[in-house]
Image (cartoon, helix red, strand yellow):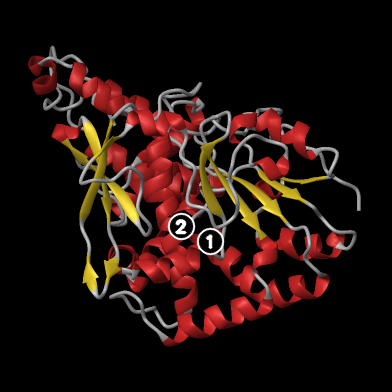
């Protein structure tokens, strides 16, 4: 088959849609407007609370908007379905209580975080398909379906074996991406990391193996695309056999077109040069022409910048096996890594290290910079001119369903206070 070299991904209008475009801190005026409307719409539907703290951060909401091409109603539909799915399957309980060894068994079947990042600061994962032979997968699925390894139950339609997979997605969004976000040694340190870069090695895999894995991988990909949108960025497929055009015909239907456009099938001659365009040689595994000592199944080989940034606690010198996430401490100045999951039937809550907070959303920076008098002035009613501007923005917005824009305009107009004499308009941050 003809190989597809890596190239920049452009929208129809020629606008580069790759990171950081369309991400927090790098939004167009229309995208900013859609984000504001999305928050209002979700709040009306009881799916979002502005806080502080907000029930969902901006970078999460933006993932759904990007996935649905900035259509507020379409993004709402996917977000609503995801929230219902998460609640029905108790995803937070799953991640907090999953057995550590069961988690690790699952992790070894899916992409492994190398402990490194690409040139943009996005975490780098490696996936070697040859380790997923039919016997291994069948044995895993049988054990996973017969044993509940957490305190949660499925919704009846999501297989137990896939719930374990989603514990790994929770690790991506709640541990690895937040960690990479707080490392300021990247070009766009004002933008949170919500993606992952993946090297997918399909060498030494027969067509029969691909066929046997088809149902397993399709189910996982379909649910991941539905409930963890816009978490994949560049995907480099390496070692494609001669028959891969057949396999590619299946695979590309499992992803949305935007994700497919970021999947690059590399010939042996293209691997080293292409990977180096996106990844420093020090962070590319040696098997693919780089300098990193990392093999599939290894624990992450942590970036020296990560080691320098964290302060280890409780005897730790690295991140332990199993699930973990970050919680704010020291008045929000630092984040603490908490190792969770269960061992021997007992849930663990162990503080592993702390990390200084480097990323601060614009609204947080603005709030910290405002004097007390300015904060108090925000409590005054917003004058009519500001409301008129909001109505104008809603009216000019182009979204898939005009009904949404109409509802937003009616809401803004209904809530606008009566004009007051000699009152100056006061801007209220979103």
Q: Is residue 204 left or right of residue 417?
A: right
Q: Are marks 1 and 2 in contact (CB under 8 Å)?
A: yes
Seen in the picture, residue 195 relative to 130 is either above or below; the reply is above
Mark 1: give few (<14), some (14-19) or many (20+) Cα within 10 Å. some
Query: Front-most of 40 and 405?
Result: 40
Question: Which of the image's four quarters has the C terminus?
Answer: top left
Circle 2: element type: helix
Seen in the picture, residue 272 relative to 363 is either above or below; the reply is below
Q: Which residue is mark 2?
A: 169
Instruction: Give residue 88's position: percent from left, percent from top.
Output: 35, 73
Query: Front-most of 241 and 187?
Result: 241
Instruction: Give residue 353's position: percent from left, percent from top.
Output: 26, 41
Mark 2: give few (<14), some (14-19) or many (20+) Cα within 10 Å. some
Circle 1: element type: helix
Tag nearer the camera, 1 or 2: 2
Residue occupying the point 59% across, 71% down: 219
Q: Quarter-wise, where is residue 321 in the image?
A: bottom left
Q: Can residue 37 be seen here?
A: no
Residue occupying the point 36% across, 48% down: 319
Residue at mark 1 to residue at mark 2: CA–CA distance: 8 Å
Among numbered discs 1 and 2, the one appearing first in the sequence = 2
Q: Which residue is mark 1?
A: 224
Q: Can residue 280 be seen here?
A: yes
Q: Is residue 375 left or right of residue 7?
A: left
Q: Quarter-wise, where is residue 8 in the image?
A: top right
């Amino acid at each position: 088959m003809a190989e597809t070299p890596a190239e920049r991904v452009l929208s129809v209008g020629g606008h580069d849609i790759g990171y950081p475009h369309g991400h927090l801190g790098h939004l167009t005026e229309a995208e900013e407007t859609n984000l504001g409307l999305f928050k209002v719409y979700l709040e009306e539907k009881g799916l979002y609370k502005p806080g502080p703290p907000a029930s969902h951060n901006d970078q999460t909401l933006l993932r759904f908007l990007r996935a649905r091409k900035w259509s507020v109603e379409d993004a709402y539909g996917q977000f609503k379905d995801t929230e219902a799915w998460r609640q029905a399957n108790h995803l937070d309980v799953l991640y907090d209580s999953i057995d550590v060894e069961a988690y690790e068994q699952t992790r070894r079947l899916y992409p492994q975080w190398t402990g490194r990042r690409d040139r943009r600061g996005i975490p780098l994962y490696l996936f070697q398909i040859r380790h997923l032979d039919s016997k291994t997968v069948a044995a895993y699925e049988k054990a996973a379906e017969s044993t509940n390894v957490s305190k949660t139950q499925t919704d009846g339609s999501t297989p137990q074996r896939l719930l374990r997979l989603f514990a790994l997605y929770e690790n991506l969004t709640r541990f690895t991406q937040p960690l990479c976000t707080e490392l300021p040694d990247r070009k766009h340190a004002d933008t949170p990391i919500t993606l992952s870069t993946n090297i997918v090695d399909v060498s030494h895999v027969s067509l029969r193996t691909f066929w046997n894995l088809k149902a397993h991988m399709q189910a996982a990909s379909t649910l991941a695309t539905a409930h963890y949108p816009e978490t994949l960025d560049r995907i480099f497929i390496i070692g494609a056999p001669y028959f891969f055009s057949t396999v590619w015909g299946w695979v590309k239907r499992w992803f949305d077109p935007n994700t497919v456009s970021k999947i690059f099938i590399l010939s042996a001659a293209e691997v080293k040069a292409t990977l180096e365009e996106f990844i420093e040689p020090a962070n590319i595994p040696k098997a693919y022409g780089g300098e990193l000592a990392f093999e599939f199944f290894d624990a992450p080989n942590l970036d020296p910048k990560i080691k320098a940034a964290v302060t280890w606690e409780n005897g730790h010198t690295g991140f332990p096996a199993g699930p973990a996430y970050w919680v704010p401490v020291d008045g929000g100045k630092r984040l603490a890594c908490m190792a969770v999951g269960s061992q021997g039937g007992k849930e663990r809550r162990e503080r592993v290290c702390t990390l200084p907070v480097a990323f601060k959303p614009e609204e947080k920076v603005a709030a910290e910079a405002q004097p007390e008098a300015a904060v108090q002035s925000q409590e005054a009613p917003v004058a009519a001119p500001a409301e008129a501007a909001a109505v104008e923005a809603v009216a000019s917005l182009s979204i898939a369903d005009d009904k949404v824009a109409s509802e937003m305009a009616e809401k803004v107009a209904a809530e606008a206070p009566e004009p007051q004499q000699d009152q100056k308009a006061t801007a209220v941050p979103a």
